[in-house]
Image (cartoon, grey):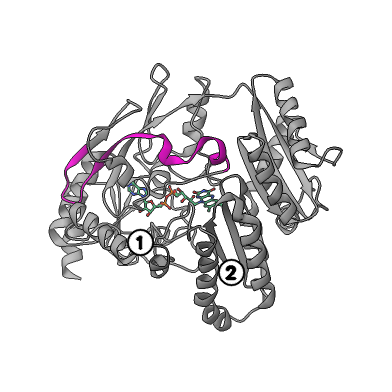
Amino acid sequence: MKKIAAVIEMLQEALPGRVVIDPDVLESYARDETIDLAAQPDCVVRAQSASDVSTVLKICNLSDVPVTPRGAGTGVTGGSVPIKGGIVLSMEKLNRIIEIDARNLIAVVEPGAITADIQKAAGQHQLLYPPDPASLDTCSIGGNVAENAGGPRAVKYGITGHYVTGLEFVLPDGSIMTSGGKYVKNATGYNICGILTGSEGTLAVITKIYLRLVPAPVHSIDLLLPFADLPSAVAAVSELLQHGIIPATIEFMEQDAIRLVAAHLGQGMPCADAGAHLLLQVEGSSQQACHETLESIAAACGIEGADVFVAQTSLQQERLWKGRRSIREALREESPVLLAEDCVVPRGEIAEFLAQLKEYLHGRSLRSVMFGHAGDGNVHIDVLKDAMSEEQWKDMLPELKHEIYRQAIAHGGTITGEHGIGCIRREYLGMAKSPEEIELYRRIKQAFDPHGILNPGKIF
Ligand SMILES: Cc1cc2nc3c(=O)[nH]c(=O)nc-3n(C[C@H](O)[C@H](O)[C@H](O)COP(=O)(O)OP(=O)(O)OC[C@H]3O[C@@H](n4cnc5c(N)ncnc54)[C@H](O)[C@@H]3O)c2cc1C
């Protein structure tokens, strides 16, 4: 207790006005969007520069005080929750979009910048930053890099890590370093940006990010395809990909997802009676080209003449995507306690994986809703607690998680596609990774953070 008090005093002296100790404010840094997880920090530092970050880390490293980096706190695996106490190092004020370099197709941003704001800034130059997590209006780019976040556009454009060309970061000893930059190829030594991407705040604190941009698509159409059931919707995805049709997004939703979203938003959703849906965005050089692709899609999926909903206006487009992005909130409204899993399997395995999982869940009288990124094999499996007692739910969870992960791995996949390990999947890492690989992680951690101060208790 004495040690932490002395550290807070040093931080207040070194960074006046940036250190928060008001318990009411600290409370709001005790959680992210993970269900049923909270831990209050001893203090929060709102860094305004890489130099502030360096100061915090130097002081904490000398005293072995834990530091948990925090972006916008939208993570769903407890990554920014300070489960070992200590300091939360918030990036919320380090949020400038420094430059959109249209000549080099690169954005230079600070980690606290909101992802949607980067997309808007790029859009003003007819450029696109493609990764689009459903939380894009609220999450930060630093959090996206630290989690290697994905989103619906991954099927065509890839995920956050595919766009990081350079990082400035601060090591736990306070040294500020840069790896990569505005160039898009780099075969010079180890790929440090690659190691930091997806490192969940356990190796270094990212303070500047160089992102690759692409030309923005000129025209796009959004459409909702209805299917009788989930297996036929998922089978259509394989057909599309085998026919060489790669839409910008291929999202799938079970009927229950659409039904709950409609109730949550208080608005009707198109094709609400279908057993399952695919939400596609098709891009093209002209509206006509988009419509031609649309016809090929209907033919490839064998649904010519079906009641496909094509969003004709930006309002309709926005309504479709708002629906997709609101699934998680709608589910939380239906059952405030639920298990939200995020497995990934090879695309051709989705149908069988989900069918077997459904059977298992039905057998245990558990209600589930499945949705997600069918185009890249990343499926969200939400199991609702409903009226089950707290005790029964908690007793059953470990076995349930184990079974979901076991089935994902048995189908050639892994336990998380985009949300990360954090602290909630830590004890299951060994199901997906060999002891030798986890030992290698430990050695990498030791090289970056020998005192183990950065985000302890996360990943392994
Ligand atoms: C409604 C909803 C929808 C979502 N949809 C998606 C989705 O489609 N795809 C997806 O991938 N995720 C999704 N997420 C999860 C979440 O939004 C992402 O993981 C996001 O990348 C977290 O960003 P953040 O800024 O909120 O980070 P935080 O939650 O604050 O932190 C996440 C992790 O990053 C670390 N971190 C943050 N900033 C830094 C930094 N500067 N340096 C080092 N480490 C840092 C933290 O320590 C923590 O481990 C969703 C969440 C919600 C609530």
Where are the magenta residues, as a range? 152-177
Q: Secondary structure at mark 2?
A: loop
Front residue of 119/346: it is: 346
**Image point (64%, 73%), residue name:** 360
- At label 1, the amino acid type is Ile
Q: Answer left or right for 250 relative to 437.
A: right
Residue 263 at least partly seen: no
Where is residue 342 shown, x and y percent of the image?
53, 58
User: Does the magenta segment cover residue 273?
Assistant: no
Badge 2 vs badge 1, beta-carbon distance below 8 Å: no
Query: Height in image: 57 above or below 248?
Result: below
User: How many numbered circles does the render carry?
Assistant: 2
Where is residue 179 shown, x and y percent of the image?
25, 36
Query: Height in image: 381 above or below 137?
Result: below
Q: Answer left or right for 325 relative to 227.
A: left
Sequence order check: which comes first, mark 2 or mark 1? 2
- At label 2, the amino acid type is Val
Quarter of the image containing the N terminus?
bottom left
Front residue of 385/442: it is: 442
Q: CA distance from mark 2 to mark 1?
A: 23 Å
Mark 2, residue position: 337
Where is residue 158 shown, x and y percent of the image?
49, 39
Mark 1, residue position: 459
